[in-house]
Amino acid sequence: MVGKIIVIEGIDGAGKATQSKLLKEKLESNGITVSSYSYPDYSSVYGARIKSFLYKEIKIKVDELFMLYLIDMVKDREKMINELKSGNYIIIDRFFFSTIAYQSAGGFDYDNCKKIIKLFDMPVPEITFFIDVPVDVSMSRKEKQKGKLDVDKFESNKVFLQNVSLYYKKLMEENFYSKKWKRIDGNLKIEEINDLIIKSID
């Protein structure tokens, strides 16, 4: 049996980490072996540099930033492929769709983003969930979670996040690089979102 990749996407504060955790618990309770990934991976050398940029410790050009985000994921490509061959389900909290949406909003060419990502031949997700949350709600959640002074440069920029959301919707409309996309209303209760995700993969 070949495994499946399930991706959970959305702007900051959409509840991706919470839903990834709940989905993993549900699948494992049904006897399915699950691997989890979350990007950026701040434990990697690439993720550490991204974190320094997000908290304004260093400046990085938009093209370099795009490649940092992408390579941070590509480093796990072979591991993912082997896990899929073993029949594992893989849950990914932010995949390269985030890279496209955020870096396009930051000035990198949208079509070039997609072309470059295709070159790396990453595994194709079975389904990608886009948790669609209003930007005001996103910013409020992050401030409550982190404190106003600890939000990063993306989380505190309303216009930027609005543009990110638009690029996510564009990817979803194009059904880019995923067998299926599904939009979920991020204003729903945590349990309701979890139920919708479970029903969509059963």
Image: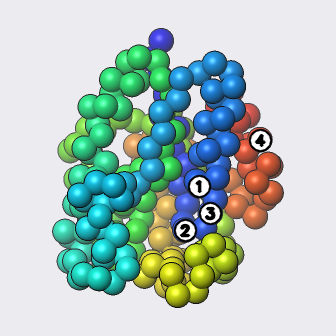
Residue 147, can we see it?
yes
Task: Say which element carries label 3.
Answer: loop
CB atoms of marks 4 and 2 within 8 Å: no
Q: In the image, 195: left or right of 129? A: right
Out of 180 and 193, give the one closest to the viewer: 193
Question: Is 149 above or below relative to 51?
Answer: below
- Mark 3, residue position: 14
Disc 2 and disc 1: Cα gap in Å? 8 Å
Amino acid carrying mark 3 in the image: Ala
CB atoms of marks 2 and 3 within 8 Å: yes
Disc 1 and disc 4: Cα gap in Å? 14 Å
Out of 198 and 82, give the one closest to the viewer: 82
Disc 4 and disc 2: Cα gap in Å? 21 Å
CB atoms of marks 3 and 1 within 8 Å: yes
Please give the label number shown on residue 195. Answer: 4
Residue 107 is situated, as x and y percent measured from the top left of the image, at 30, 77
Residue 174, can we see it?
no
Amino acid carrying mark 1 in the image: Lys
Q: In the image, 85: left or right of 171? A: left
- Marks counted in the figure total 4
Residue sitting at x 26%, y 31%: 78
- Mark 1, residue position: 16
CB atoms of marks 3 and 4 within 8 Å: no
